[in-house]
Amino acid sequence: MAPEVQAVVHSTQAWLRSSWHVQVPFAWLEACVEWLQEEAGGAGRLSQQQINQQALDQWLLTDLRDLGHPVLPESLSQAQKTELSGTFCVQVDSLLDIGQPAYGQLQKWKGSDVANDDVSAVTQATQRPWEARPTRMLLLQVTDGVQSLEAMEYQSIPALSTALRPGVKLQLQGKMVCRLGMLLLGPSNIKVLGGEVEDLVERNTQGKVLCRTLRVPEEQQQEPAPQQGIFN
Amino acid sequence: DIPPPPPQQADMNRGQGQVRGQIRRVLCVAEKNDAAKGIAAIMSDGNARRREGMSKFNKIYEYEYNLFGQNVTVTMTSVSGHLLGLEFKAQYQKWYSCSPVLLFDAEVEKYCPDNMKLIKRTLEKEARQCQALVIWTDCDREGENIGFEIIDVCKAVKPNMQVLRAKFSEITPNSIRRACETLIEPDTNVSDAVDVRQELDLRIGASFTRFQTMRLQKIFPQSLANQLISYGSCQFPTLGFVVERFKAIQAFIPETFYKIKVLHDVEEESVEFSWKRNRLFHHTACLVLYQICMEDPIATVSSVTSKPKSKWRPLPLDTVEMEKLASRKLKISAKETMKIAEKLYTQGYISYPRTETNIFPENLALGPLVEQQTHSQAWGGFAQRVMEQPGGPNPRQGKKSDQAHPPIHPTKFANSLQGNEGRLYEFIVRHFLACVSQDALGHETVVDITIAQENFSASGLMIIARNYLDVYPYDRWSAKVIPVYEQGSQFQPSAIEMADGQTSPPQLLTEADLISLMEKHGI
Ligand SMILES: [Mg+2]
């Protein structure tokens, strides 16, 4: 490999690390840069800055499992109780709200929740008794590509939602507690970097995640129904 | 009682000028024999002469009365609900006479069913003797339509008859007298609306019933054989609600949830604090938070808020609410409730029971109505309290008005009614007294605590004045004692527990739920 390409790769690697805390294996980044240059019509067509940005975009769309480059402390998922601090970039494979029943969420997702189910005869109930309103708590399946574990929305994090694309990349930062293999997250621990993973987008739609939680057969992807005569 | 709705007052001047001198006998027709009897008793001061008509269920009452400013002889009789029915012309009546789809356009006609023929003949006979006809059917849509059936029958034998309509909400002396003084024109629009509904019911019901019966019998010849699969435009969606709920229960998947609860025993009291997160559907997540609490199980009182809380007295009673409450609280079905209520109405005990209004009109004097009830052993004391409360009777006001009838209320005191009649009357009276009295007043205290950053809450209720609850045993409000907590103070809970539970499917529909659903969908 030409030494000038090596220098570009090194430079991108350093930029990803310092600006984004993103760590990638050199070999992957090298292949990535070569491909970017090829697509652009040859070496030298892209500035270092363009290469940096495009490499970051590629990383956001990559399944971190393909990189096999661990960043989280070893055996974190086995920890009974530990605290970690630092900045770690991870991928969210799926999200689930564990603050409310999956059944109701699945009905809403399918658009089949029946408003009539809520109607009852008590119309003069007047002032409602005090009761806790259901609050959201998202449970995230996260991975650094080698180690997978669960993370919970310990304090409300407005940046997260079930609408995030499976495979989205997150930056975990600051002090975090990990108990029983579960990370406890608050709003100051999270920065959403974006991206997705094509495979996961298909495998982990909200509908499928909810079906798996309920242990019911997963819904077919919405494909046009085969044309069939009524009397077949 | 209330004056009739903005009337299209009949032009009596013109009528009087030309016709007055000729009016000697007036035919009055009520919707049922009971009503005719009650109205006749009031108009004649109990001196009506009774004679038989051709139908043995519909008597004729005669008396003198001052109507149109002159003394006339009144012939008061009745029908038994609708006098006429609607049917397809003969060539379409047989099941296989035509394709069901043709029933949407086939010609229809009104006819008099056999069991109404004697009533019709009585009307024809009496109409020939009278110069004017006054319609005394119930003042609702059906009543207006029945009125026009009577008019058509009478006018067929006596085309130049004067026709007027009495408007009333109660069969009480004041209300009947006022109706006599303010006779109006019958309302064609209201009657036409019923004709349209009847025609739609007939066409849709007959065509779909024939279609689905013939089709399904062909597909399931064994199991359906000669069974009729009937279709009705109200009954079908209603059946749909029942099926929908049943399927929702069948399809339901229960899920396990976990929660943390905190108990605190203070002397005799045991306070349970519930988790602000309510519940989590994940064991490990809950266990993590539980462990955190257990490692530092000291509760800090983060806030104590105390505020007045009231329980509202009921709204004035409309028909749907009466049916629902009677079903839930008295266990009397909606159908039975209406039957009893109609009877109480025709006997003058309550106002007209078919109303969508839950606002008392301003000019309806509530004082005398409350006063009547002070004679009761059971609720007389409460009625007296209402009379003495500052400002007197003070109805809570709803938002609905049908512009025709006031909310259901007692019009006469009764203490001899038995069985379900007595129970429904008592309910209507108690509901009335409750809605014109005062809200129950209380004081609620909410105590929030924090344990290792998890928040919990408990509440207590002190009842200061029961007010309407004293007369309304159908509502409950229980006090809950909570000891005094001071903001910022700390305590060691008696126990912190992780509990689990399961979600459960919706309940099968009760009759009251079904009525709510029908109301929601305008059925
Ligand atoms: Mg009626």
Image: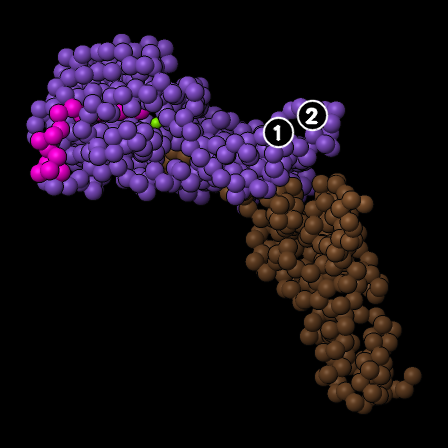
Chain colours: A brown, B purple
Q: Kindly give the residue lying farthest to the right in the view shown.
A: A1
| Subunit that carries the residue with mark 2 | B
Segment colored magenta: B15-32
Asked if the residue under mark 1 is in contact with the one under mark 2, i.e. CB atoms within 8 Å, the reply is yes
Q: Find disc 1 in the rendering and name its residue.
A: B229
Which quadrant, please, contains the N terminus of chain B?
Answer: top left
Q: Secondary structure at mark 2?
A: helix
Three-letter code, disc 1: Ile
Please state if A142 lies on the left or on the right of B90 as rendered: right
Mark 1 neighbour class, 10 Å CA radius: few under 14, some 14 to 19, many 20 or more? some
| Subunit that carries the residue with mark 1 | B
Magenta stretch containing residue A209, yes or no? no
Residue in the picture at 69% in, 32% down: B216
Please state if B233 lies on the left or on the right of A69 as rendered: left
Which circle marks residue B215 in the picture? none
Which circle marks residue B224 in the picture? 2
Residue in the picture at 66% in, 59% down: A164
Q: Between residue A22 and residue B22, name the one nearer to us.
A: B22
Question: What distance separates the C-alpha of mark 2 from that of mark 1?
Answer: 9 Å
Q: Position of residue B493 (x, y in %)?
A: 52, 32
